[in-house]
Amino acid sequence: MRANPSGIRARVTDHAVRRYAERALGVTVDGDDNEAMAALRERKVAVGAVRRHLSTIGGLGVANKAQAVIAEGLKLVIADGAVVTVLAKKVRPDPAPSGPTVPVQRRQRTCLDAEYLP
């Protein structure tokens, strides 16, 4: 990752703060983004500190003209100089196996194979 020597900071939307609270802090709130910000403040989440943190990390992406920054296991999506959302590294759970696995049948080696040993 390239440096950000000029200390450029990104703007951070309320939506990004909300998603960071959900995906990094584990605090889930209902309603639209404005209602969510009020609910986060009621739950004593340091919204200003979260916004500054995202602004600093997102500033690296803005300084380097990136569309996203990956840090702390999260992906910060950047658009028009602002962090617009925060995505978890793994959004969906792995699908459950559908059944027992079947071993793969390997073909018999021939003298044409590069790894053939007599």
Image (tube, rainbow, N blue to C red):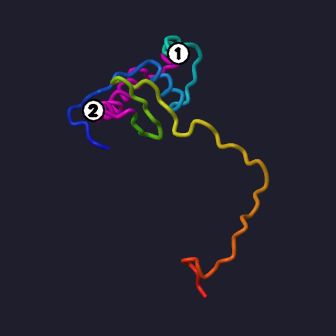
Residue 62 lies in magenta, yes or no? yes
Percent position of residue 31, x then y: 58, 13
If the image is split into quadrants, where does the C terminus sit?
bottom right
Mark 1, other Cα within 10 Å: few <14 / some 14–19 / many ≥20: some
Vertical comparison of 15 with 77: above or below: above
Residue depicted at x 47% and y 20%: 15
Residue 19 lies in magenta, yes or no? no
Residue depicted at x 53% and y 19%: 43
Q: Residue 36 carries which label?
A: 1
Judged from the image, the secondary structure of the residue bearing numbered disc 2 is helix
Left/right of residue 21 with respect to residue 70 in the rendered view: right
**To which residue does mark 2 refer?**
63
What residue type is disc 1 on? Ala
Q: Quadrant of residue 65?
A: top left
Left/right of residue 33 with respect to residue 51 in the rendered view: right
What residue type is disc 2 on? Ala
